Image: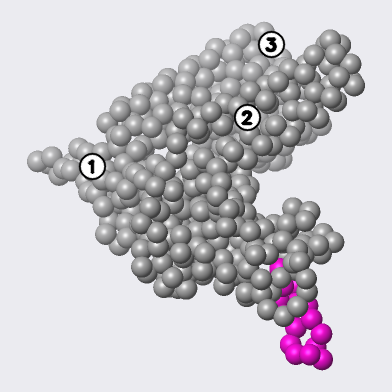
Amino acid sequence: MRDALYARISEDDLGTEKGVFRQLEDGRGLSAARGGEVVAEFSDNDVSALKGVHRPGYEALMVAVAAGQVDRIIVFHTSRLWRNRRERAEGIERLRAAGVSVLAVKGPELDLTSASGRMMAGILGEFDTAESEIKGERVARAALQRAQEGRANGAVLYGWRRVYEYDDQKRVVGFRDEEDPEQASIVREIVRRLREAETLRAITEDLNRRGVPAPGAGHQRRRRAKGQSEDGARWNKTSVKKIAMRPANVGLRVHHRGRPDEVLIPANWPALVERDDHDAVVALLSQAARGSAVLVRPGARAHLLSWGIGECGVCSGHLRVSRKGNARYGAKKLLYICEGTGCVGRDESRVDLFVRRVVVERLMRPDLADLLIVDEGAKAAAFMRAEGIRGRLAQAADDYADEKITAEQLHRITARLKPQLEQAEAQARMYRVNPHVKLVLDMAGERAGEIWDEMNVAQRHAVLGVLIERVRILPVARRGPGFDSRSIEIIWRTGDRA
């Protein structure tokens, strides 16, 4: 008999493959005892057979069966071969057609060319599937109980340490997670720095430069992320972002993550971060992922108004920075210019200085907080108006598809409603909650100018994002020396202009 060995282990977190090695060793012994010859060995390590996921070893075994290279398959137990009903039914038919039997180290030999053999394979398989499903139900019920009790589901999270509870006989009867002072301080630092408009890249590089161990440092892993050290001690932007956005930071536990019935449950571990700070950081990083124009995202922003708040007063295009001038009359200067045809151009340093003066003056006003308060009624009206116009556009598209209106009518409707939608969306943006509001409020008062000067460009840009809708560079009436502040128009988010 030409024997093919197949081994499978569902869970092997450390990737040692000791389980499949034992199964293959026992299979070789059984093949020799039955007078067979092992012609091939296949295995799937750390792969479940219940959910029907891809099993490379199993598929390679079936290819060998279809090619007529195998007379008998030897497994440790039939449950190693099949757990999923659909896969089992297909497998039985494939082995029947090829005339291949199944022999278990701990179980019977199944002749799948006979009706009784296939019946026995089906009956044993149902027991195997039921065993997995019943175990899954027990695990799910235990997981629900842990969630309801607010306990962690697995290893202790970064920022806390696990304290075990014992009975009189020194047996573990429970555990609790309490704050780890060193790790908790790193979590708070990450959240604070993000609220202060530092970038993920800057925070990541600083943590690695300081040698702060990343979550999971020293733990054994089968594979590491690209660029990660062997001991897993280095941070990357993804790990910093995940730490910052975890509901666990504010004492919430996620149950059924990513499923339709996902729910947040109060946890029994202490919160590390204030809820307002957490919500602001989640909004910040979520909007950055969606590409919001309100937020500052680049890791190395060098210019305050380029490709963002700055706007050409002629064509409404973005501003970029370019070095212009005649070297014979002195060094060339950096200018803000229109990205398109260069409609406008203005000395970058003088524009930035003017913007600083106007913003600092606004930050020093005693009514600054009042300027940031949102009229909830106006906010709701703006959003409803925008949604209403979108609905009318969608209805027009449906009417055209149903031949209720002509293409010309659709074009006229769209041309009329689109400018209204743009205006409504611009008004709605004025009421969007900006996660950098706290950064602005912390600057309020006499020290506004001093704090502004200590900030990097990304932080200054974040402040502008809270206060200002646009900084518009207008054409000058006449050319000549000096800087005309009247050619710079600042449009505040309140609708005022300066």
In the orientation shown, which residue stands out farthest toward the left? 168
Q: Amino acid at mark 2?
A: Ala
Give the image location of residue 273, x and y in percent.
33, 50
In the picture provided, is 483 more to the left or to the right than 193?
right
* Vertical relation: 80 (above or below) 45: above
Q: Which residue is mark 2?
A: 386
Tags 2 and 3 touching, CB below 8 Å: no
Q: Residue at x 84, y 10 (%)?
A: 404
* SS for callout 2: helix
The amino acid sitting under disc 1 is: Phe
Which label belongs to residue 92?
none
Q: Earlier in the sequence, mark 2 or mark 3?
A: 3
Q: Quadrant of residue 182?
A: bottom left
Q: Does 78 appear above or below 155? A: above
In this view, the residue in front, 452 or 486, is 486
Residue hosting label 3: 114
Quarter of the image for the N terminus: give it. top right
Query: From which residue to which does the magenta span run?
Result: 322-337
* Quarter of the rendering occupied by the C terminus: bottom right
Tell me if I can see residue 449 in this picture.
yes
Inspect the magenta stretch and tell me whether residue 333 lies in it: yes
Q: CA distance from mark 2 to mark 3?
A: 69 Å
